[in-house]
Image (cartoon, rainbow, N blue to C red):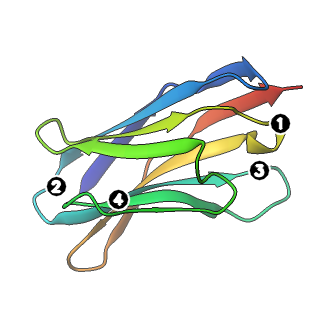
């Protein structure tokens, strides 16, 4: 079992920045992919950014150039640096982890609200 805990959400004005963190614990030895997803009211959960154990990254088109995902393998933590935030970035952001057996784990979510 893998336990994920997010932190760093909050309220920010448009154009501002936030940094989300996600710490993993438990059976983390086989985790190879970490990611951030988000879900806005009335919408489906969508991938925001992902990163492999080796550091290969992928981003949703809507956040490219504004968000940066990174990971500290020694701390079992993944970060999402969000810059130039827009009101449409408002959502609950979920941390995600996937292991070599294709099991998927989710954090509890952290609210990000961007005011215009």
Residues at marks 4 and 1, CA–CA distance in whole angstroms: 25 Å
Sequence-first disc among 4 and 3: 3
**Disc on the earlier residue, 2 or 1:** 2
The residue to which callout 2 is attached is 28
Closer to us: 78 or 102: 78
In the picture, the disc for residue 43 is none
Residue depicted at 21% across the width and 63% down the height: 31
Quadrant location of the C terminus in the rendered image: top right
Q: CA separation, marks 4 and 3?
A: 22 Å
- Residue picked out by circle 4: 51
Residue 47's spot in the image, x, y percent? 57, 63
Comparing marks 1 and 3, which lies closer to the viewer?
Answer: 1
Labels 2, 4: front one: 4
Which of marks 2 and 3 precedes in the sequence?
A: 2
Q: Earlier in the sequence, mark 1 or mark 3?
A: 3
Give the CA distance from mark 1 to mark 3: 11 Å
Q: Nearer the viewer, residue 57 or 115?
A: 57
Q: Position of residue 38 (x, y in %)?
A: 63, 52
Q: Earlier in the sequence, mark 2 or mark 4?
A: 2
Label 1 sits on residue:
87
Q: Residues within 10 Å of mark 1 (few under 14, many from 20)?
A: some
Would you identify the image quadrant in which residue 9 lies?
A: top right
107, 16: nearer the viewer: 16
Q: Circle 3 sits on which residue?
A: 40
Q: Nearer the viewer, mark 2 or mark 1?
A: 1
Q: Closer to us: mark 4 or mark 3?
A: 4
CA distance for labels 3 and 2: 29 Å
Q: Residues within 10 Å of mark 2 (few under 14, many from 20)?
A: some
Residue occupying image coordinates x 22% and y 65%: 32
């Amino acid at each position: 079992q893998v336990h994920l805990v997010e932190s760093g959400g909050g309220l920010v004005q448009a154009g501002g920045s936030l940094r989300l963190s996600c710490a993993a614990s438990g059976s983390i030895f086989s985790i190879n992919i970490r990611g951030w997803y988000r879900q806005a009211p009335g919408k489906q959960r969508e991938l925001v950014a992902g990163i492999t154990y080796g550091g290969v990254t992928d981003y949703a088109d809507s956040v490219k150039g504004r968000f940066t995902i990174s990971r500290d393998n020694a701390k079992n933590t993944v970060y999402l640096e969000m810059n130039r935030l827009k009101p449409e970035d408002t959502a609950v952001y979920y941390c995600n982890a996937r292991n070599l057996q294709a099991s998927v784990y989710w954090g509890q979510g952290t609210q990000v609200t961007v005011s215009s």
